[in-house]
Amino acid sequence: MRVLCVATALPGNEPDAVARAFASSWNQSRPTDEIDICLNSDGENVAHVGTGLANVFCHRVGQAEAVERRHGSGPGRIIWISRTDDRALIDLAEAATWNGNGDPRGSSAFLAEDLLWLAEHHVSNVHIHLPALMNHSDLGLGMLSVLSGISFEKNMTDGALKQAVTLARSRLGNMSLYITYPHDQFLHGPDGIGRIWQQCGFDACTAQDFNSTATDIAHRLDRALSQHNLTMSRRQMRHQQVFDGVGGGLGKMFHTLNAKLDLLGQDLTIPTQPADLYVYITNSLELHVPRGLIQVSEYAQRVGAPFVVVTARTQIVRGELPGLGIHGLYRLSDIDLTGITELTVRLATTWGWDA
């Protein structure tokens, strides 16, 4: 029997620790089975771990250096750099997620400084993971100003705005930007950011002012780009709203700078050899279903194999499982390696079979 397990972070345990606990326990119960392991992150913070994305990145590139950055007014953050293939990871979900406390506004200028620093160190591929709601939110204007060298003003003409975008793109040169986010916003577009803040208890007047500014800037960006032959394709325009507002509006700004944007987990690589059972271990399965989980579910359906999910917490009811392609949903009673070990033995007993 062949089993594929996709492991993400659980409280206190990085994805690789979760994977080792699963593989060890399954092997003890069924030593002749073959086990494939994929490490993944769902992109949201897990207690005492963070997102687990750095752990996944380090395993994928083989070796990475952690560089702490505390320049400017930005958050304390770590940039992970692989010198062997000129790749880097900036996890802003771990460094700057807004959890409803304090003022989410600020400046994204620090991110431009990070990108220029990486360019100086000849890093050509940068993965930036954005939270759905972010501290230092400014619609990406601080980043655009630093990259272009042009200060943003409310009365800036469309021509000047177009010039800022062109200069920013040029400053980044051949750098490839891959931007991910954990899930789409409830309210699409930059003008939805303030409304979400207000729902989370932020001052209503301030949130409405931000909304007004966001709407104006979004429209002016679109108008400037369309008038100066920097238009997006029809397909891009159809899908831009689902990520425009993530990261405090950085989603739209990065799209304007020709970055590629994806839900985290969209690029999950699943072994081509079909398994007899697919298992996905995640911290949370609630309103937002992780994209990686959907990827594995769809793959399992294509090869005709059962798909089982293990989670620390969930609001999903049994009647919703068939729609997600889930054949078994298990909740961890103890969210530690012992709990994973005990539940894995149960899974091996229930789902293991011999030809």
Image (spheres, rainbow, N blue to C red):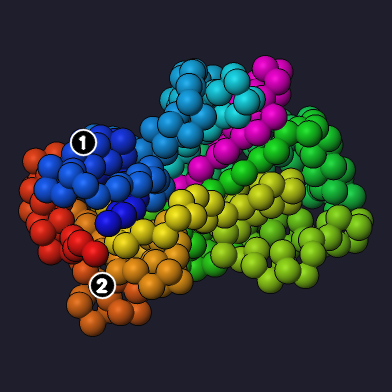
Residue 281 x/y as whole percent: 27, 52
Q: Quadrant of residue 82?
A: top right
- Seen from the viewer's position, the closer of residues 158 and 15 is 15
Q: CA distance from mark 1 to mark 2?
A: 27 Å
Residue 12, which numbered label?
1
The quadrant holding residue 149 is top right
Q: Looking at the rendering, in which quadrant would you find the N terminus? A: bottom left
Horizontally, is 2 left or right of 242 in the view?
left
Q: Position of residue 322 (x, y in %)?
A: 30, 79
Query: In the image, 264: left or right of 229?
Result: left
SS at circle 2: loop
Task: Please give left or right for residue 195 compared with residue 231 in the image.
Answer: left
Q: Which of the pair 2/227 is nearer the observer? A: 2
Magenta stretch holds residue 328: no
In the rendered image of this protein, does residue 199 appear above or below residue 264? below
Q: Position of residue 151 (x, y in %)?
A: 75, 35
The range drawn in magenta is 105-133
Q: Most extreme residue toward the bottom, as rendered?
A: 319
Dot 2: few (<14), some (14–19), or many (≥20) neighbours within 10 Å?
A: some
Q: Kindly identify which numbered label has been placed on residue 327.
A: 2
Q: Residue at x 55, y 39 (%)?
A: 128
Kind of residue sitting beneath label 1: Gly
Q: Is 126 within the magenta?
A: yes
Q: Amino acid at mark 2?
A: His
Looking at the rendered image, the quarter that the C terminus falls into is bottom left
Comparing 15 with 206, the one in front is 15
Label 1 CA crowd tier, 10 Å (few <14, some 14–19, many 20+): some
- Tell me where residue 241 appears, x and y as whole percent: 61, 66
